[in-house]
Image (cartoon, rainbow, N blue to C red):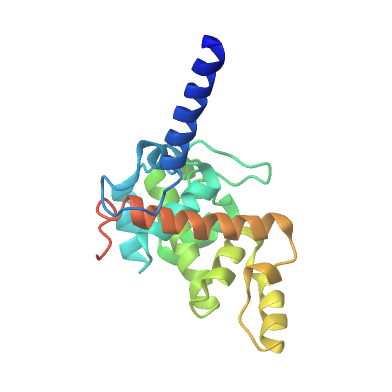
Amino acid sequence: MRRVLFAALLLTLVAGVVGAGLLVLGGRGADAGSWYDRAVYPLQYEETVRASAERNDLDPALVAAVIYAESRFDPGARSQHGAVGLMQVLPETAQQIAGETGGVDFVPEDLTDPEVNVRYGTYYLRQVLDQFDGDLVAAVAAYNAGAGAVQAWVDEAHAAGHQLRVRDIPFDETRAYVRSVIEARAAYRHIYGDRLQLPS
């Protein structure tokens, strides 16, 4: 009987801790959110995130959210498609960006450097936001699936009289990716608003 009562008490305590931790959007600032929130949505390299976001006129929480979705803040991450680093930048994309921005000494190994990776990743993110007139869903989808594919989806959505919606994205992986980034952006804004120097 004691074992049953102890197990029930333990389950109640665990449920309470997890339930409290699920209140991700409950606060704002450096100490907003619980330890659980900060464990689920970690933040590293915040100075690099802030500087690159400012340079490219981006929301730092969006940059953090893309990093979260792409690599979980692992600078050594590599995809099966050859993308590298925090923002999973393809070497050929980085080479093109280097040419556009005067990075004449760029070599693919530079993408393991968080500062270089985030600089190039945010440059590309700004490009797709501009290409899709600031449409967040389309830009985030393009970051994942490529601008060519997304342009076709945007055209279909516009022909139907609306902007591209998450549910309009035909690829399961990209649809899940866009949802993940949008949810993570909201979490980063609320949990780390002060550290990311977001306006209140």
Residue 176 in which image quadrant: bottom right
| Residue 105 visible in the displayed image | no
Residue pictured at 52% horizontal, 43% vertical: 71
Residue at the extreme top of the image, as rendered: 2
Residue at the extreme right of the image, as rendered: 170
Residue 162: x and y in percent read 63, 85
User: Is residue 115 toward the left or the right of residue 176 in the image?
Assistant: left
Residue 186: x and y in percent read 43, 59
Residue 145: x and y in percent read 66, 61
98 or 183: nearer the eye? Answer: 183
User: Is residue 30 toward the left or the right of residue 76 in the image?
Assistant: left
39 or 6: nearer the eye? Answer: 6
32 or 18: nearer the eye? Answer: 18
Quarter of the image for the C terminus: give it.
Answer: bottom left
Quarter of the image for the N terminus: give it.
Answer: top right
Residue 156 in which image quadrant: bottom right
| Residue 55 visible in the displayed image | yes
Residue pictured at 28% horizontal, 49% vertical: 47
Residue 63: x and y in percent read 42, 57
User: Is residue 1 toward the left or the right of residue 9 in the image?
Assistant: right
User: Is residue 56 toward the left or the right of residue 168 in the image?
Assistant: left
Residue pictured at 66% horizontal, 86% vertical: 158
136 or 143: nearer the eye? Answer: 136
Residue pictured at 37% horizontal, 64% vertical: 59
